[in-house]
Image (cartoon, rainbow, N blue to C red):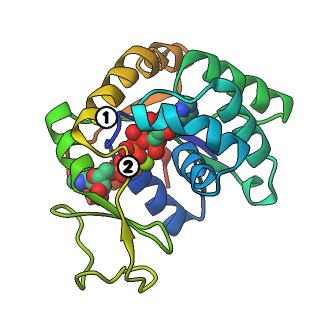
């Protein structure tokens, strides 16, 4: 199955992709996570991407399209994958269509999670992640069972993203509205777009997504 999770910053794309990965063995391809790794490792792409990411703007299409084109060729993507954070504008969506048709693959579902901006801001400001396994948490909505110990891997070191601050969040919302929202009519016209209420609790959103996917 090939699935795109679409939604504004903080909508829950990463959270739901990780659940689908853990429960259904689908591979999560998060361009945000891949770019953050490239920035941390100071690779050529990372050095080029850093300023745009810190400002809440999009990294160039060339970089992210190359990253995804390379990644979907790996063996673990043979049975399908979840795209989290890609595509983010119409040219990226067109590049994805070309990649898939070249490989004889088909996009099965695009799931949009809708959440209002007040809630998105709360989610982003309270978010933190396990430094070892990247499991996502939240100060209020998803605390580890034991404080400061990761539920998944037992790690005790957690990080917060540099772009998770109130100024950058506003720029990320603006980028989403102007560049990513045009993907909604794009995928609606292809008959693959489904909408779920991303305002519900994590479990309920997961249930709605599973109903759409039929898993
Ligand atoms: P990216 O990493 O993709 O960030 P984003 O789109 O801003 O989305 P987030 O990761 O912030 O949110 P999410 O939807 O994954 O929410 P999460 O599940 O963590 O991109 C970062 C940057 O990289 C971009 O700004 C850009 O510069 C660059 N980039 C990436 N891809 C690119 C591309 N294709 N082209 C160009 N540039 C690109 O949830 C948030 C919090 O809420 C968590 O703490 C979670 O526990 C909690 N939560 C989740 N669901 C719920 C719920 N239902 N109820 C309560 N809490 C919840
Ligand atoms: Mg994410």
Q: Residue at x 41, y 31 (%)?
A: 55
Circle 2 residues within 10 Å: few <14, some 14–19, many ≥20: few
Quarter of the image where one finds residue 56: top left
Task: Name the foreground residue: 84 vs 42.
Answer: 42
Q: Specify whether residue 19 is in view.
A: yes
Q: Total number of numbered labels?
A: 2
How many neighbours does mark 1 have within 10 angstroms: few (below 14), some (14-19), or many (20 or more)? some
Q: Nearer the viewer, residue 110 or 75?
A: 75
Vertical comparison of 98 with 204: above or below: above
Is 191 left or right of 138, judged from the image as shown?
A: right
Q: Of the two numbered discs 2 and 1 on the same chain, state the one appearing first in sequence.
A: 2
Question: Which label number is shown at residue 168?
Answer: 1
Label drawn at residue 36: none
Element type at marker 1? Answer: helix
Residue 173 falls left or right of residue 99: left
Rendered position, 112 above or below 142: above
Residue at coordinates 38% horizontally, 53% vertically from top-left?
161
Where is residue 81? Give x, y as percent.
Answer: 64, 50
Query: Which sits in the foreground, 58 or 207?
Result: 58
Answer yes or no: is residue 212 visible.
Answer: no
Q: CA distance from mark 2 to mark 1?
A: 9 Å
Q: Position of residue 65 (x, y in %)?
A: 70, 31
Q: Quadrant of residue 4?
A: top right
Residue 162's mark?
A: 2
């Amino acid at each position: 199955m090939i699935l795109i999770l679409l939604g504004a910053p903080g909508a829950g794309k990463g959270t739901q992709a990780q659940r689908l990965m853990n429960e259904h063995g689908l591979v999560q391809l998060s361009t945000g996570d891949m770019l953050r790794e490239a920035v941390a490792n100071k690779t050529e792409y990372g050095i080029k991407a850093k300023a745009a990411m810190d400002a809440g703007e999009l990294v160039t299409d060339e970089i992210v399209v190359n990253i995804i084109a390379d990644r979907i060729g790996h063996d673990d993507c043979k049975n399908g994958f979840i795209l989290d954070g890609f595509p983010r504008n119409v040219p990226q969506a067109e590049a994805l269509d070309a990649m898939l048709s070249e490989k004889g693959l088909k996009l099965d579902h695009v799931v949009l999670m809708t959440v209002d901006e007040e809630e998105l801001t709360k989610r982003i400001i309270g978010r933190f992640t396990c430094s070892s396994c990247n499991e996502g948490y939240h100060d209020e909505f998803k605390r580890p069972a034991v404080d400061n110990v990761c539920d998944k891997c037992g790690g005790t070191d957690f990080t917060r993203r540099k772009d998770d601050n109130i100024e950058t969040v506003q720029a990320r919302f603006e980028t989403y509205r102007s560049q990513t929202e045009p993907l909604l009519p794009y995928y609606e016209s292809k008959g693959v777009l489904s909408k779920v209420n991303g305002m519900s609790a994590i479990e309920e959103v997961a249930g709605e997504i599973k109903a759409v996917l039929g898993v």
